[in-house]
Structures are given as C-alpha cells and as structure tokens.
Image (spheres, helix red, strand yellow):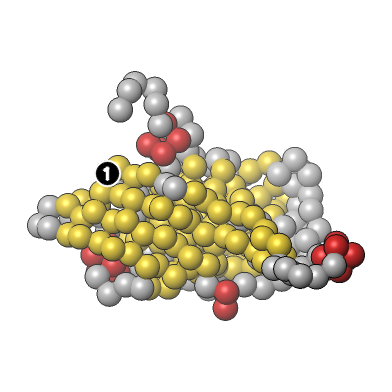
Amino acid sequence: MAAGKNKLVRFTRLYFGGYDLSGDQRTFGELVNSFDPVDMTGEKDAVENFLSSKRRKVGVKGYQALLNNAAAGAHTILKNAPQTGIVSVYLGGGDVPTVGDMAYILPAVQLADTTEFNTGVGALSTDFEMNAAQMSSLVDTPIARVLMPKTALTITTTGTSVDGVAGTTLGGRANLHVFVSSGGTWAFTLEHSTNDSTWATLLTFAATGNSVIAEHKTVSGTVNRYTRLLATRTSGTCTVACAFARN
C-alpha cells in the first residue's frame, strides 16, 4: 500500500453487536443508502410517474477483514452464521474515529459470511444485509455522527457535545455497543441542548453496562442542535461506543 493511500478504510471501524470486527486490516465494497424504483414494466408512463413507491436499500456490502484471535472473541459469533445484530461503521478519515466523525448505523442486519479461521488469524468476507423486521418510521437515513468512539470507562463520563448546526423535528435513533463489561451498573443517556449549556434527556438506553450487548434506540419529535452521551457509573467498568442519526 502506497504511503497516504486508503486512509479512510485504514481508520474505519466496524462494530457488530458487542463485537469489534474491525480487524487488523479491512476493506469495504459499499455502504448502501439508496432507493430502487418499483418494477412497473408494461405500465403506462402516466402510471409510473404517478406512483412514488420506492424500495429502500441499505446495508454493508463486500466487507473483508483480517481478525486476530484476540479480537473480542469474534469467532464466537461468526462460527454459526448467519447471525442478526446491530451494526455501526465509524468513518475516521485521516485518524482513528473520534467525536463528531461520520458514522453509518443500522438497527439490525443479517450476517451471511464465508469465514475461515486458523489458530492465529481469521479471514472474514461478508455482507451485512438489512433485517426488514427491524425497520420503523423512526429509522430513516443511516448517516450518523459519532457521540462516543470506542472508549474504556472507569468513572462517570460526559461525552463531548456534537453540533448538529440546527435543531430538527423528525426524531432520530442511536446505536450503543458495550464491548467489555466487568459486570457493574451504568446508565447511558443521550442528552440534547439548544445552547450547548443547558441539557435535557433525549433518550435513555435499557443497557446497564453489566454485560456485552448492543442496543438500537429511537426517539420521535424535536432533537435540539447539540447532542452528547452521558455515561453514569454506579459500579464496575465497561467499554462502549455510541453514534446518533437525525431523521
């Protein structure tokens, strides 16, 4: 690989459920976000132009990664594919993903893979296809912003705020991944603010940080300009990541 090339993929991270499947190296074919017209072959032009129904296409296509044998026990979830889980792709650009970077999140996908493992390395080649049963009116574009990159938490932590430029009124959704847990108790709350000073609760995850898990949460109505993640500790430690998308 030439110096300075392929930096987007180099720093991109992919999380599936409570597993980090980024691997030591990775590449993507496509992050799909499009509409396909409904096939109306044989209909008159007037009929086709009148009907606005579209088929939504989202999903991760052509993902390949080299997973080392310490990569969060990935073999556990991959060996009995297909599996269903929440997927988040963090696009780090020129460095490891951080707060405010772009992300691509889906509520649940079917993992169909052809995976080979040996004692030291696993070669994963797969598509992550949307599970239609997980769609709702509050799941629109998969394009999101990172509220918390993958972070080891030992104390109550207030995430850095993300400026959405303006408030919105159509709700949104968030993906939370808990990768490591000591079995303690945490509360994960997404907050929003009009002025980056006074904060109110936007949504609260059910996950308590006491186990490895991933959760997709939706919210309707107004989302103020600024958003952030608040992780409140009662006991224990955990490692989490969170991203939020506005509709």
| Residue 201 position within the rendered picture, expressed as x and y whole percent measured from the top left | 68, 62
Side of 19 relative to 98 (left or right):
left
Quick one: label 1, few (<14), some, or many (20+) residues within 10 Å?
A: few
Q: Residue 111 is drawn in which quadrant?
A: bottom left
Q: Quadrant of the N terminus?
A: top left
Q: Is residue 108 above or below residue 87?
A: below
Q: Residue furthest bottom?
A: 133
Residue type pointed to by label 1: Asp
Query: In this rendering, does residue 211 appear at all?
Result: no
**To which residue does mark 1 refer?**
24
Nearest to the observer: residue 135 or residue 71: 135
Q: Residue furthest left?
A: 119
Residue plotted at (60% across, 61% down)? 57
Side of 77 relative to 52 (left or right):
left
Nearest to the observer: residue 229 or residue 117: 117
Residue plotted at (67% across, 59% down)? 35
Q: Residue furthest top?
A: 3
